[in-house]
Image (cartoon, rainbow, N blue to C red):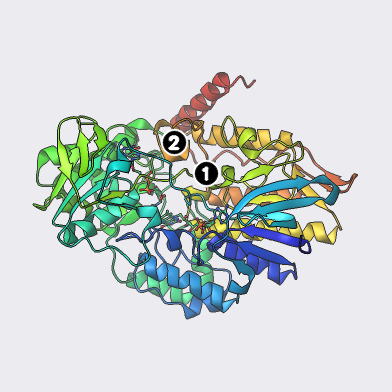
Amino acid sequence: MADRLDVLIVGAGFSGMYMALKCREQGLKFEVIEAGSGVGGTWYWNRYPGARVDIQSLEYSFGFDETLEQEWRWSERYAPQAELLAYANHVADRYDLKPHIRFSTRVTAAHWDAAADGWNVTLDSGAVIAARFLVLATGCLSVPTDVTFSGIGDYRGRIYRTSRWPHEGVDFTGQRVGIIGTGSSAIQSIPIIAQQAAHLTVFQRTPNYSMPAHNGPIPEADWQEWLQDPRAYRARSRNTVGGFWNEAREETLATQTPPDEIKAELERRWAWGGFRILSGFADQGIDPDANRIIASFVAAKIREQVKDPKVAELLTPKDHPFGTKRPCVDTGYYATYNRDNVELIDLRSDPLETFTATGIRTQGRSFDFDAVVLATGFDAMTGAIERIDIRGVNGETIKEHWAHGPETYLGLMVAGFPNLFLITGPGSPSVLTNMIHSIEQHVEYVADIIASLNAAQAGRIEATREAEQLWTDHVDQTAAMTLLPQANSWYMGANVPGKPRRFMPYAGGLHTYTDICNAVKAKGWEGFVVARGAQVISESRTFTTYPPPPENMAPHLMELAMGRVAQWMQDHGRA
Ligand code: FAD
Ligand code: N01
């Protein structure tokens, strides 16, 4: 075994790269292991046509270095995948990170070595690396679901997965193409594939809400604001629920606003595009009546865009409140169904039975395809972590520890797994936010923990089980206050058969979460035990740093939210 590392980082997306940089700043001995042959993570793997961000690039970009910020110019409001990948490579080259990354290599196991206060990490080559700290920067949306279809092995055409798209690209010109799925990946790729293909058949099981991106040059007002004071622009983004500026109106209630004012506000937000419609009214995420107002506005927008009323009806979500699944941001998605060469198949009324040698057979029809695209999603948040055989102090695996759904302390650490850090793990705001800002906050926090352990000459840090349970209850209860758990979403683990149902990200907002993390640190790493061998250096077993109740919440909303929490407590046997 080679000399022991201070830090082994798994993954070379934005999380792993920034973690590597922080390790270098501290003079630590580190290495990054990456399964792909290049950096960029999400933007390395997801090369399907139309792939781009749904948060404006001015905000979905690193803010830790002003020079980096100033030297990079985004070409559009929502940068496309190729530009994001170029940015990731620019970051890697600018900070000379690539020599520290072992590409095309997968971490398969990590076992805690109590005698050494560290991890023995096994690679797919069979090599074992010892490291004091293990950082899982493995991504929340990096492992495609294992979904399979009967007869798929017999199909003689080509099959593509959006999340594993060929690097050389795919030209569908003149082809008959089928696509399964209508999540964000499909909604971005369908308009482009439709322009190329002779015919495109979309197989939809559940419709999603989608808002127009109105992509184009960065709006002049944003650009000017950014140029004037990039630090203030960043600070404003970070100090929000979602980690990006969205003009949230925290006191205006849809249920108490006259219809013409609601319409004007929603039209304004729709015209701006993207996620802005998610934060027009304080009650839309809590009160079903308010939510229905926004949902029916969006349904009307779908009807406006799709000429055939039957198709528009099929494309309108009915099974989940607006915003409780990750909404999509599109360019020309709904209008694509007005094309003569595009057909929508509703798998609810005509279920998919099997692939055949030449295509797909549903209960009622047969389709021949030259190519089929699977846009079927990810084993989100826990998938990449659970696929590594990680064994902690008692030999328990993380998968076993998470048998009832993920339990973490702050989404950062897991009890019984010392010196193991998750970046944007379950239990942190993560996928509910602008991920770059969440990544920066997490990486800086982990780097802080490592620095403070080194300053105290401590060997390890571990989240206590008490703190983990209290935090996990808080995560569950925060979600329960909202409408979010009402959808069968991947946030809930509902897209993977057999996966425990638990709302995985922390819904309290990035700003609140950051304050909590800072308070945990100020209290001497509350909820953690810091030790060297058998000697405990500091110990604070519980978590007490709950955020104060929102002062400006309307009484009836508070009552609704608290009622749901009381129900949750009853259902889960909490006093
Ligand atoms: P990733 O980019 O997923 O990188 C993780 C890396 O770890 C991967 O390269 C993977 O190969 C590697 N890895 C995993 N397991 C192992 C292992 N065992 N051994 C070795 N290597 C391993 N977020 C937003 O905020 N805004 C957006 O607009 C947005 N758009 C998205 C679009 C798509 C198509 C997808 C899939 C996600 C999007 N996201 C978006 C979420 C996105 O994942 C994050 O924004 C961000 O890129 C995550 O960076 P990361 O480094 O944490 O993880
Ligand atoms: O995956 P999804 P995604 N038979 O899970 C269907 C981010 N992202 O890759 O809902 C038939 O959303 C499934 O149907 P149903 C973003 O966070 C962002 O599109 O289970 N259909 C669904 O329609 C996003 O939320 C962007 O009924 C099956 C689809 O496949 C996340 O990544 C772009 C099926 C999967 O949708 C995941 O998005 C892309 C089956 N057996 C991704 N199995 C941006 O815009 C699954 N489906 C920035």
Q: Residue 175, percent across and down?
A: 17, 57
The residue closer to the viewer here, 196 or 306, is 196
Q: Answer with the quarter of the image where residue 48 lies.
A: bottom left
What residue is shown with label 2? 496
- Which residue is painted at 37% across and 44% down in the image? 281
The numbered mark at residue 5 is none
- Which residue is painted at 11% across and 51% down in the image? 338
Q: CA distance from mark 2 to mark 1?
A: 10 Å
What residue is shown with label 1? 383
Q: Answer with the quarter of the image where residue 462 lies.
A: top right
User: At label 2, which amino acid type do we have?
Assistant: Val
The residue closer to the viewer here, 66 or 423, is 423
* Quadrant containing the N terminus in the rendered view: bottom right
Say whether residue 37 is left or right of residue 256.
right
- Which residue is painted at 20% across and 36% down in the image? 361
Q: Residue 438, percent across and down?
A: 55, 55
Q: Is residue 232 above or below residue 290?
A: below
Say whether residue 372 is left or right of residue 487.
left
Q: Residue 255, percent across and down?
A: 33, 35
Helix, strand or loop under label 1: helix
Q: Residue 366, percent across and down?
A: 16, 38
Disc 2 and disc 1 in contact, CB within 8 angstroms: yes
Residue 424 visible in the current orientation? yes
Q: Is mark 1 within 8 Å of ligand 1?
A: no
- Which residue is painted at 9% across and 43% down in the image? 308
Count neighbours of disc 1 (C-alpha within 10 A) and say few if under 14, some if 14 to 19, many if 20 or more.
many
Count neighbours of disc 2 (C-alpha within 10 A) and say few if under 14, some if 14 to 19, many if 20 or more.
some
Say whether residue 538 is left or right of residue 138.
right
User: At label 1, which amino acid type do we have?
Assistant: Gly
* Quadrant containing the C terminus in the rendered view: top right
Helix, strand or loop under label 2: loop
Say whether residue 73 is left or right of residue 429.
left
